[in-house]
Amino acid sequence: MKLVIFFLLLSIMGFSDHSYGQGIGGDVKKTKQQKPKLQVNNAKQAAKIVRRRVGGKVLKVQNQRVNGNRSYRVKVVKPNGHVTSVSVDAKSGRVKGK
């Protein structure tokens, strides 16, 4: 019963999805901007993504920075025997160069 009353009070006060970040006192100011979270945080995660998307066996993973953007260079042997190198963007998790 107490829980029902609590949720009724919240709905009456106007707390909903569209008013997130606004309390009873009005707008909430952001004090600092948050850094975007990385999709790929380490070489192990990059290797796992490449195994799923490209297949084969991962030989080597290198950490890279291209124009200030972090990425991983993954060398892989495909199931057909070809050795190839692909890049995994750390921010988006996208694989380039299949």
Image (tube, helix red, strand yellow):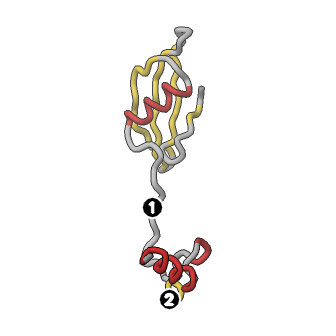
**Residue at image coords 53%, 85%:** 27
Specify the quadrant that holds the N terminus.
Answer: bottom left
* Mark 2 crowdedness (10 Å alpha carbons): few <14, some 14-19, many ≥20: few
Q: How many marks?
A: 2
Q: Quadrant of residue 43?
A: top left
As drawn, the label of residue 80 is none
Q: Residue furthest front?
A: 1
Residue named by callout 1? 35
Examine the rendered structure and indicate whether residue 44 appears above or below residue 26.
above
Specify the amino acid type for callout 1: Lys
Determine the secondary structure under disc 1. Answer: loop
Relative placement, left or right, of 94 versus 2 is: right
**Residue at image coords 58%, 33%:** 96
Position in image of residue 9 (x %, y %): 51, 83
As drawn, the label of residue 24 is 2
Q: Residue furthest right?
A: 18
**Along the line of sight, which residue is nearer the eye, 8 or 33?**
8
* Mark 1 crowdedness (10 Å alpha carbons): few <14, some 14-19, many ≥20: few
Position in image of residue 97 (x %, y %): 59, 29
Position in image of residue 47 (x %, y %): 43, 30
